[in-house]
Image: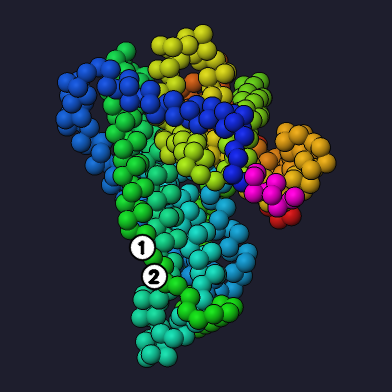
Amino acid sequence: MTGALRARTRRQVPPALVAAAVVPGLFALVPLVYLGVRALGAGPAAVLDVLTRPRTAELLVRSVALAGAVTLTCVVVGSGLAWLLVRTDLPGRRAWAAVLALPLAVPSYVAGFTWIAQWPAVAGFWGAYAVLTTVSYPYVLLPVAAALRSADGGLEEVARSLGHGAGRVLLTVTARRVRPAAAAGGLLVALYVLSDFGAVSLMRYDAFTLAIFTSYRATFDRTPAAVLGCVLVCLAGLLTWAEMRARGAAAQRIGRGTARAVAVVALGRARVPAVAAVVAVAGIALGFPAWSLVHWAAVGSSTGVDWPALAGATAVTLQVAALGAVVTVLLAGPVGVLAARHRGRLVGVVETAAYAGHALPGVTIGLALVFLGIRLVPGIYQETPLLVAGYAVLFLPLAIGAVRTSVAAAPPALEEAARSLGHGRLAAFARVTLPLAAPGVVAGAALVFLTITKELPVTLMLRPTGDDTLAVQLWSHTGAGAFGAAAPYALVLVLVAAVPTVLLDRAMRR
């Protein structure tokens, strides 16, 4: 009976669950569709005029150049550090692995603030390049290190038995093994750079995101901003396609049985320069921002801190982050359950649609929701509901992944047993699966909360007038050159983000 019930559960997708999952899927597609409709609404001639402007070509070159330079550097630095941490006898490898991953938690605009506050002349391309490289290289380091740890040492032993030297084995076997991981990490870096708004605005580097935001704020004609937003979306899609083409196939294990352990490389005389390289990266990416924040916080304290404004921004940040996390998890629930318990084309379409918002830069989602708010639902424009909707579109995939993983880990047989005892489908899920999946779902909510506290472009465009978050206050003070006044907001922002980070880390260790 249990087997028959299990088979039926796999075949039959509850219509109510499908209906509940389709809603967030369509919700996530709304900004993308509306942005396209808004751009084409001005007519082909207007779109062609924007696309053929020298300014558009200049923005394209500048954005691609920045993304290419940062990605190339991150692939080299991240892959090199991963090899040192996993394959060599570098002293303190475990401690360094934790330290070198920490810059991933530093918002780009906080890192940009620390750089430009110390050296105001460090701006433009090289300033944005330095800041984005220091916060992005962990996107490559982490997947490449994981690929190196899981690699089968037998392949390298076979290559050495054929007479290949260490360098040739590294290039022909090890590099091929980690190439998909490096390509995936490089794609994340490139998409992050293309969508970044905080660092390029603080460094005054005119990329697509800054141009879209400036066009939206400076003119009543929003067509150029919509067209540029569509170009940015197409560029992100092109990068994703290029990564799939360049990923290639990794070297595969040979033989059967357990994978052979990989031999650790003794650094010998290279140990000193290797340690120096690791210390230099950690110092630039983590030590310098920490020192600069403390320094400017001390300067700000000596000149007076606006405590009411700081407390107000902290309260607004906590409020919108908590509300956004709750709404996002509620929307993600049906999609995550559907993806965890069922298969098929419909499930794939719904899940892919729900992920659409995460592929879009935050500035384009903010722009699309501004258009929607003004044209279709003016009552919620620059109100909290529209801001929370923007967060939900942007971070829905984070919550879906947590729900899907947690529900998939709960044995379906337990839910089936509850149903065999007379409980309905919903009651069996609520009494059996939901308690088992709850820790993972809460961890997903903490991840969404953490990400919302750091979000900048959507908050800038959609926040209610007068309700400034810590990120907005930091951006405003830094833009005015008031670095001492900006530092307390940066420090509190880091502390607010650290709490869910610690909780998330503890949840993942269980």
Which secondary structure lies at badge 2? helix
Q: Kindly identify the residue that appears in the image at 43 percent across and 39 percent down.
A: 359
Q: How many C-alpha atoms fall within 10 Å of the one at disc 2: few (<14), some, or many (≥20)?
A: some
- Residue 278, image x and y in percent? 51, 65
Main SS type for the magenta part?
helix
Image-quadrant location for residue 317: top right
Which residue lies under the disc numbered 1? 248
109 or 364, nearer to the observer: 364
Q: Which residues are magenta?
A: 1-9
In this view of the protein, which residue sits in the foreground, 460 or 34?
Answer: 34
State the image coordinates of residue 120 (x, y, percent, origin top left). 40, 39
Residue at mark 2: 176
Residue 294: percent from left, percent from top: 60, 43
Contact, mark 1 vs mark 2 (Cβ under 8 Å):
yes
N-terminal of the two: label 1 or label 2? Answer: 2
Q: Give the spatial CA distance, label 1 vs label 2.
A: 9 Å
34 on left or right of 352: left
Q: Quadrant of residue 160?
A: bottom left
